[in-house]
Image (spheres, rainbow, N blue to C red):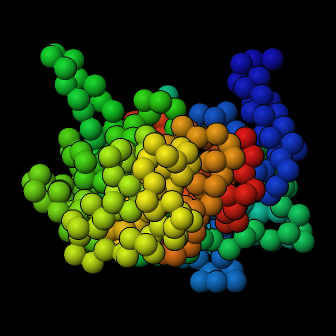
Amino acid sequence: MDNSMVKYFKAIGAVQSVISNATTLDEALQGGLKAIVENAGADSGVIWYADKAGDGKLHPYFWIGPVDLTRRSHALGDGAVGRVFESQKTERLYEFRADQDVETAIDFMGMPVKSMVCVPFSNNAEDLGVIQFVNGMESECFNDETADVMEIMAMMAAIAIEENEALTAPWQPGEVVMELRDITREFQNGDIVTKVLKGVNLDVYEGEFLVLLGESGCGKSTLLNIIGGMDQATSGTFEYLGKDLSNATQEELTDFRRDNIGFIFQSYNLMPNLTAVQNLKLIAELVAEPMDVDKALEVVGLSERKNNYPSQMSGGQQQRVSIARALVKNPKIILADEPTAALDYTTSIEVLQVMEEVVKSGTTMVMVTHNEEITRMADRVVRMRNGKMHEVTINRHPAHATDLVW
């Protein structure tokens, strides 16, 4: 048996194993797509779901790749995805030429597309959507052999859908509050240049709980610092509510942070010589329309500890004070950098419950964590890898803090 056949059967076996061992439909689809992308040698992959009960368009259900497709959709006949769903015929576009369909070549949110395979995603009961693969990892161009594998694996993924089980309707995000495009960040030490972010494209939505996940050094904290105006990108554009902050002065960034952003740090960063209420008043004096400090402490359940100093409180209580300190600014967005890393499990859940309530009140939350379990609470999860967005997951049924176990 030649190497191509070995690779072929290995790929099919990997997808079959993932789908058969999945305990939920989302697990089957997400795991199946990961296996397909990895074994077929694709750079990116998307499951597009047809929202027949809603607007009738195809929306991204789950995707792997360096772009944010959350707002993207395809009507029937719109781009390669829309055409494939309408015709129920696979499109294999191995290499684009200058005279080919320009719309198709850029319909992956502006990312240069050099090779694409779009496969109908259907089971015996109905046409569900389309699975799209973009760019090969090595040669950057697919061929008939890899496309054949993709078609068969897509058919296997569709088998995971029972005839009486419907895919959950797509998540409906709020208005865009932040847009980051082609963000890079480099640090220079002598002659050595370290590239931490390598072209991030991300939108942040009003009222969402967004988690940035990844191993140490993947760029998630650097990205959070840029979102919070504590650092500036080396290149790319960063807009907040339509205002371009890409080349903002330090004074403009200070105003941006003060008026719009609340921060929750891993190490609490409370003033040790001030009581809880005094720590909040210190911040409240800096903003034009602060929340009442007593109300902020009530929200985090610490009204009775208002006159305690940090040294008189547990780690969890100090972190709740830091949440109240963020809230007292009445910020549009709260940024949390590993807020439970220094806490035990029980205390972490207590803190996450408070954060859950904050998001429910309409505040946007962006959290950096390496804890996979916490991602179950999020509306969206962006997994970072090697300075880029690697994978985006939308949780259609976010878990409560009390459901988490680690």
Vertical placement of 206 versus 406: above or below? below
The quadrant in which residue 121 appears is bottom right
Q: Please identify the residue farthest to the bottom as the structure is shown.
A: 54
Query: Could you tell me residue 357's position as x and y percent?
Result: 58, 69
Judging depth in this view, the residue of 125 and 103 nearest the camera is 125
Q: Is residue 170 left or right of residue 264?
A: right
The quadrant in which residue 68 appears is bottom left
Residue 354 appearing in the image: yes
Judging depth in this view, the residue of 244 and 329 nearest the camera is 329
Which image quadrant: the C terminus?
Answer: top right
Q: Write the residue at 16% across / 16% down.
A: 191
Query: Could you tell me residue 116's position as x and y percent?
Result: 52, 48
Q: Write the residue at 45% across / 62% down.
A: 306
Query: Could you tell me residue 150's position as x and y percent?
Result: 68, 44
Judging depth in this view, the residue of 267 and 311 nearest the camera is 311
Judging depth in this view, the residue of 91 and 281 nearest the camera is 281
Which image quadrant: the N terminus?
Answer: top right
